[in-house]
Image (cartoon, rainbow, N blue to C red):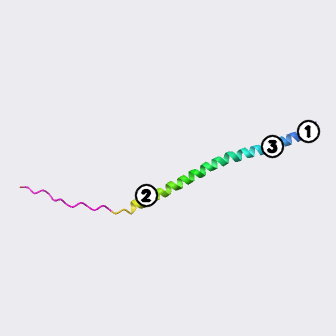
Amino acid sequence: MTDLSLIMLITGIIFGALAGSITVHVVYKNKLADLEADVYDARVIREALKEEIFRLENQSKPKPRKNRGKPQKK
């Protein structure tokens, strides 16, 4: 009876460890996919902001308005 109990205990530990490692892998795989999506979104936003900054820095200054002069008193 003790040999059977020992074999069942070892078998249970092996299956438990296997099920636990599979569960951990699935959970962290989903979290990793979410983090990679966030990194991709951040890179896209960074590129868009860099283009906007470059566009704003290279704009020419607006031309000044012509002086209308003061109205003459009569």
Residue 74 among those drawn in magenta: no
Instruction: Look at mark 2 in the image and give the residue it sits on.
Output: 52
Residue 69 among those drawn in magenta: yes
Q: Quadrant of residue 55?
A: bottom left
Q: Of the residues shown, which amino acid type is indicated by label 1? A: Leu
Tell me residue 6's x, y (percent). 89, 40
What is the span of residues highlighted in magenta in the rendered image? 61-73
Image point 82% across, 42% down: which residue? 13
Q: Of the residues shown, which amino acid type is indicated by label 3? A: Phe
Q: Of the residues shown, which amino acid type is indicated by label 2? A: Glu
* Mark 1 surroundings: few (<14), some (14-19) or many (≥20) residues within 10 A: few
Tell me residue 28's x, y (percent). 67, 47
Disc marking residue 19: none
**For the residues marked 1 and 2, what is the alpha-carbon distance in whole angstroms?**
72 Å
Query: Of label 1 and label 2, which has the lower sequence position?
Result: 1
Of discs 1 and 2, which sits in the foreground?
A: 2
* Mark 2 surroundings: few (<14), some (14-19) or many (≥20) residues within 10 A: few
Q: Quadrant of the N terminus?
A: top right
Tell me residue 19's x, y (percent). 76, 43
Image point 26% across, 61% down: which residue? 64
Mark 3 lies on a secondary structure that is: helix
Disc marking residue 4: 1
Mark 1 lies on a secondary structure that is: helix
Q: Which secondary structure is most common in the magenta stretch?
A: loop
